[in-house]
Structures are given as structure tokens and as C-alpha cells.
């Protein structure tokens, strides 16, 4: 019967494979979207300063520009700001703020937990490992900001190429690489170590 394949037999086998593929993709979509959905988090970075004259914390954009309210004012306590936004479809729990170095060296890829300020507005407060109120739950559409001390040596000594967060599912969400490069550039330009 199957010594010579007819066009109908080939079409039957191909349609059987395509039916299996369609069924598996349907099951995967239902599983990932409805049964066990995971949140999508967006991470962004910035360099921030405290401005005591106006009692505010201002964040520089990637071009090194400050908001107009802080132009010409004295700025103190530089820190890196990491903002995390939950785009849903479910709530997320942020467990750690992490950094990664040596991205292209897969054998020696290093991950580090970043020490955060618990309350950046308090002047004598020191950063510690679980600062910033971690773990923190984020509802859909919510945003959380964390602050950590930064210096020019932070990037050079550790060869940092990615900064992000880890959620309760064990997934890691990183900022764009160009934001890490911009933060490094701004740190070198605006922060002079004593």
C-alpha cells in the first residue's frame, strides 16, 4: 500500500503534522495567557540627585539634562535610580535588584545583588542588601523606584553591562543596555570621587 506515495497520502501526512502543530500552539497560548500568566516588567535607569533648596529628588535623562526646576541649584548625594513598571497581565513581586557583568563571557558570567537605600530622602541612611522595601508587590500598572549608591568605580571595577530586577517567578528583567551605558557616562561626567 505504501510502496509509492500518492499525492493524497503525502497531503494526509502533511495535514496531520500541521494539525499537531496548530493544536500544540493553541495549548501553549491557553497555558501561557490564561492558566499560568507571568507579568511583563519594564526596567529603566537614571542618575538622580537630592536638591536641598527645593526639597526634591531630581533624575537626569539619558542626555544629561535636568528638569528646569533644578537648573542652577546645588545637588547632593548622587545615586542611581531604577524604576520598574508592571505591564501585566498579573501582579508581580520584585525580590532583588541585580547587576550582571561579562555578558559575552558565558562561562564566567557574574550576577550581583545591589544594596539599596531604604529611604533615599534621609541623609544619614546607609544602603543595605534588602533596602528599598524589598520584596515589593506591584499591581498591574504600578511603578516602583529604587535608589542605590553609584560611583565611577561601580562600572569599571565590576564590568557592569546589565542592571535589572528579579521577580518571584525567578525571571530576570533588565534595562536596555543603552541606559546602562548612559548611566555609566553620566556617572563619569557628573560624579567626582573624593
Image (cartoon, rainbow, N blue to C red):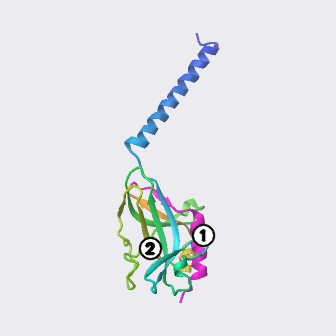
- Given residues 179 and 85, the one toward you in this image is 85
**Residue displayed at 54% across by 86% down:** 193
The residue that mark 1 highlights is 181
Is residue 173 rendered magenta in the image? Answer: yes
- Given residues 167 and 119, the one toward you in this image is 119
Q: Quadrant of residue 156?
A: bottom right
Q: Quadrant of residue 27?
A: top left
Going from N to C along the chain, the mark reached first, 1 or 2, is: 2
Is residue 110 rendered magenta in the image? Answer: no
Q: Is residue 155 visible?
A: yes
Label 2 sits on a secondary structure element that is: strand
Residue 42: x and y in percent read 49, 59
Pick the quarter of the image with the N terminus: top right
**Residue displayed at 38% across by 85% down:** 124
Whether residue 10 is situated above or below residue 122 in the rendered picture: above
Q: Is residue 5 visible?
A: no
Residue 23: x and y in percent read 47, 30
Whether residue 4 is situated above or below residue 133 in the rendered picture: above
Label 1 sits on a secondary structure element that is: helix
The residue that mark 2 highlights is 147
**Residue displayed at 43% across by 43% down:** 33
**Residue segment shown in magenta:** 169-194
Residue 55: x and y in percent read 43, 82
How far apart are labels 1 and 2 at the CA level?
A: 18 Å
Residue extending farthest top: 1
Whether residue 90 is situated above or below residue 30 in the rendered picture: below
Label 2: few (<14), some (14–19) or many (≥20) C-alpha neighbours in 10 Å? many
Amino acid at each position: 500500500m505504501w510502496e509509492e506515495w500518492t499525492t493524497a497520502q503525502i497531503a494526509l501526512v502533511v495535514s496531520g503534522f500541521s494539525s499537531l502543530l496548530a493544536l500544540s500552539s493553541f495549548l501553549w497560548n491557553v497555558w501561557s495567557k490564561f492558566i499560568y500568566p507571568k507579568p511583563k516588567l519594564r526596567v529603566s535607569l537614571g542618575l538622580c540627585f537630592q536638591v536641598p533648596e527645593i526639597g526634591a529628588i531630581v533624575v537626569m535623562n539619558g542626555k544629561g539634562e535636568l528638569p528646569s526646576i533644578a537648573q542652577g541649584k546645588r545637588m547632593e548625594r548622587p545615586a542611581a535610580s531604577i524604576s520598574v513598571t508592571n505591564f501585566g497581565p498579573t501582579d508581580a513581586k520584585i525580590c532583588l535588584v541585580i547587576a550582571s557583568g561579562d555578558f559575552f563571557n558565558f562561562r564566567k558570567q557574574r550576577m550581583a545583588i545591589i544594596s539599596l537605600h531604604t529611604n533615599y530622602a534621609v541623609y544619614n541612611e546607609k544602603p543595605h542588601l534588602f533596602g528599598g522595601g524589598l520584596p515589593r508587590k506591584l499591581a498591574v500598572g504600578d511603578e516602583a523606584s529604587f535608589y542605590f549608591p553609584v560611583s565611577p568605580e561601580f562600572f569599571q571595577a565590576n564590568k557592569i553591562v546589565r542592571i535589572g530586577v528579579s521577580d518571584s517567578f525567578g525571571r530576570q528583567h533588565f534595562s536596555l543596555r543603552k541606559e546602562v551605558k548612559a548611566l555609566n557616562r553620566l556617572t563619569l561626567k557628573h560624579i567626582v570621587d573624593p
